[in-house]
Image (spheres, rainbow, N blue to C red):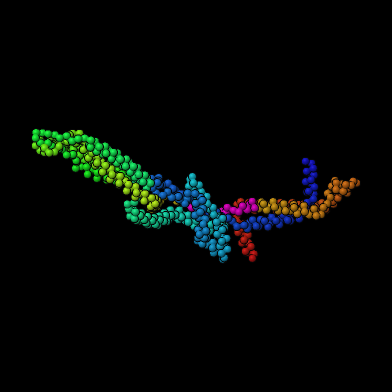
Amino acid sequence: MNEQIQQARRYVRMVWPYRWAALGLSVLVCIGGWIFALMMPDIYEVKAKIFVDTRSMLRPLLKGLAIDSESLASSANMMKRTLMTRPNLEQVARKTDLDLKTKTDREFDAVISGLAEKISLQGTQQDNIYEIAFTGSDPKQAKRVVDELLNTFMEAALGSNRKDTAVTQKFLDEQIVQYEQRLLDAEGRLKEFKQRNVGVMPGEGSSYFRNLQNAREMLQRAQLELHEAQNRSSTLRQKLEGEEPVLGVMGDQQSLRAPAASRYDGRLAHLQEQMDQLLLQYTDKHPDIQAIREQMEGLKARRDEELKELAAKAANEPQDSLSMDEPAEGGVYQEIKLAMAEADAEVAGLTARVNAYQAKVTELEHQVDSIPEIEAELKRLDRDYGLNKQQYDELLKRRESARLSQEVDQQADDVKLKVIDPPRVPLLPIGPNRVQVMTMVLLAALGAGVGLAFLLSQINPRFYSSEELKEITQLPVLGTVSLVFSERQRTERRMELGVFALTLIGLFAVYGALVTLESMHVNLSSHISRLIEAKS
């Protein structure tokens, strides 16, 4: 600690001889810095606060029906994007006469850049209060700038939703017209395709290969049934050939009963053929197939009744109606002939069915190259039509939502703006902080003076004690000679120290006076400006 004190005393001794140079430099720096601080232009700030009321009863009620548009005041970033655009800043600069001070495009760009830097936008989404602030050297001009910014924001906030809705609705109308034309074109292509390929269109719910497989299965089934019916008919024919007819004699006459046939057999065969044709395209549950099946069951019941009546009539026929030359058949023989007639009718029907199935299979096999292409083209046309129809319906729904949103905006204000703190011309500036600047100037001046004295001491070094001389020269010091001042010299020295102290105190006094006047908001810069103008 003692060494540090000795080192500090040494530095003080080094700079002390150059105290006047240090003081002079400090005074000069203080005078220049304080004048600069006093001549700095005042900075005024103008603020305006806006309350954005987004509470609306219509929006919750129309949720999902109308478009929930985002207001411009939903966030400070949205406000900044609205206000800080180049066109808006140019409009504000021209309306507030900031462009009158510029002569070139570069100067105008500098004014616009400075305007953007001086605008401050702050806000919170919790209380929906937003603040627009602008700083400038002219309080009246700063107020005009804030007024223009406020007007621009309110116009954008109130008109943006309606403008966006109108633009959106116009766009939707144009898209709907385009998609409507696309839908009509798709319908026309689909209709022409169906007309061009009538008769070979794939069945509902089935494809070509499924139809071909079903046709082949039904052909095999019909061939099997035909084979069974042919075997049954052949067996009955063999039995009939082995059965002898029995002559029935009643009195002097004989009768021979002919085989009975029904008049419903032809209609049944025709209905069976129609049902076979439908089964090639549809399933058993198709309404037409079920209707034909019910009709066939009714005809079969009538046929059975008719055959019974014919058999009973033949059995009860009187003897005198019989010819003695005609043999009368026995009951077994008659039953075999009836069964053979039914088998022959069934063989005929199954033959027609097999022929129909065979023709259908042949037709499908010939269409093996064209039918898949037709099916693929039909699916592509259906898919194209479906996509256009879906997009068209979606656009109609969106347009209705946009129309409803526009009506909501016209009937009630979805966003209400209230200026809770209008801009005012400030009476006192917010800057610059001259007290801080003058303090920094004083400290810098003192530092510059001490630095100058230290630099001079290094240029012209001196020894101020025998210990320093001994330490540097490494030689013993035999003695020292002290300087003895006379009374006159001591008086001059005291006066010189007094003047130095008074000058230093005066420097601090001027600093204190300037700080006091600045704290009292005395505009010294205007007084200095008037003095300079008066002298000039």
- Which image quarter: residue 264? top left
Query: Residue 50's x, y, as percent?
Result: 48, 50
Query: Residue 58's x, y, as percent?
Result: 39, 47
The image quadrant where one finds the N terminus is top right
Q: State left or right for residue 408 relative to residue 23.
A: left
Query: Residue 449's x, y, as percent?
Result: 74, 53
* Residue placed most toward the observer, 507 or 329: 329
Query: Residue 259's x, y, as percent?
Result: 18, 39
- Residue drawn at the location 51% of the way across and 57% of the way down: 85
The image quadrant where one finds the C terminus is bottom right
432 within the magenta span: yes
Residues drawn in magenta: 420-437
- Residue drawn at the location 52% of the way across and 60% of the way down: 90
* Residue placed most toward the observer, 430 or 243: 243
Q: Main secondary structure of the magenta part?
A: loop
Q: Total of numbered circles in the picture?
A: 0
Q: Name the outermost residue toward the right.
A: 478
- Residue drawn at the location 30% of the way across and 40% of the way down: 227
Residue 55 in view in this figure: yes
- Residue drawn at the location 66% of the way across and 51% of the way down: 439
- Which image quarter: residue 318? top left
* Residue placed most toward the observer, 77 or 65: 65
489 within the magenta span: no
Q: State left or right for residue 350 relative to residue 120.
A: left
* Residue placed most toward the observer, 364 or 485: 364
Q: Is residue 127 above or below residue 331?
A: below
Q: State left or right for residue 393 relative to residue 465.
A: left
Residue 420 in view in this figure: no
Q: Is residue 228 above or below residue 378?
A: above
